Amino acid sequence: MLSRSLRIVSQRRLLSTTRILANKAPQTTTEVKTAQDLAEVTGPASLIGPGAKPGTIPTDWDQSTGLQRLELLGKREGVDVFDMEMPITEGKGTMDDPFLVPTYIGYRYVGCKGTAELDHKPYWMKVEEGKPSRCWHCGTVLKTKYLGEPGMAH
Ligand SMILES: [Zn+2]
């Protein structure tokens, strides 16, 4: 009985090792291209511009990289990638129906400036996953809405 269960364990280990090797293989052969739109962004390496032709002044589109290029790609498509304008679009701010704060990292700082009936100086709160936050000036309730990869918060 004992030797049989040992054999099963070692077989499992072999299987998972092959799976890791199989997953690694494609990454080394894939060539990264410059993303032409948001859907083609695969990582930082796809956010490098094509460069300007000799004798011309480079535009942002030619030479911007990284987060700047990501924002530029978004602007061309009318997408606010950094969620700067109005991140909260869901909820009513009540205990039963809190405002949902989109987050990719499990928390987000939010400044509450009050409601239509009662406005106040900005009150900053750290809205964290798992516990609703309440503004103690006006009573507005906020909750996180996690948009990142499952299990990657914290
Ligand atoms: Zn408030």
Image (spheres, rainbow, N blue to C red):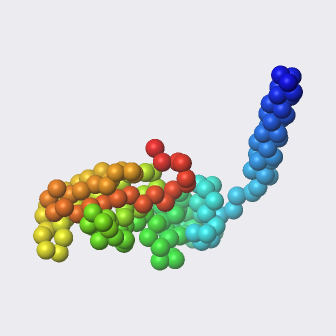
Q: Residue at x 39, y 51 (%)?
A: 130
Query: Residue 134, relative to residue 57: is it above or below?
Result: above
Residue 9 point in image, percent of width and height: 80, 30
Residue 35 point in image, percent of width and height: 63, 66
Q: Residue at x 79, y 33 (%)?
A: 13
The one of 132 and 62 positioned closer to us in this rendering: 132
**Residue furthest out toward the top:** 2
Query: Residue 88, relative to residue 42: is it above or below?
Result: below
The one of 40 and 17 positioned closer to us in this rendering: 17
Q: Residue at x 13, y 74 (%)?
A: 117
Asked which quadrant contains residue 83, the reply is: bottom left
Residue 56 point in image, percent of width and height: 57, 71
Residue 103 point in image, percent of width and height: 42, 57
Specify whether residue 28 is in view: no
Side of 109 relative to 151 (left or right): left
Q: Residue at x 18, y 66 (%)?
A: 114
Asked which quadrant contains residue 2, the reply is: top right
The one of 121 and 53 positioned closer to us in this rendering: 121
Side of 82 relative to 36 (left or right): left
Side of 129 relative to 52 (left or right): left
The one of 51 and 100 positioned closer to us in this rendering: 100
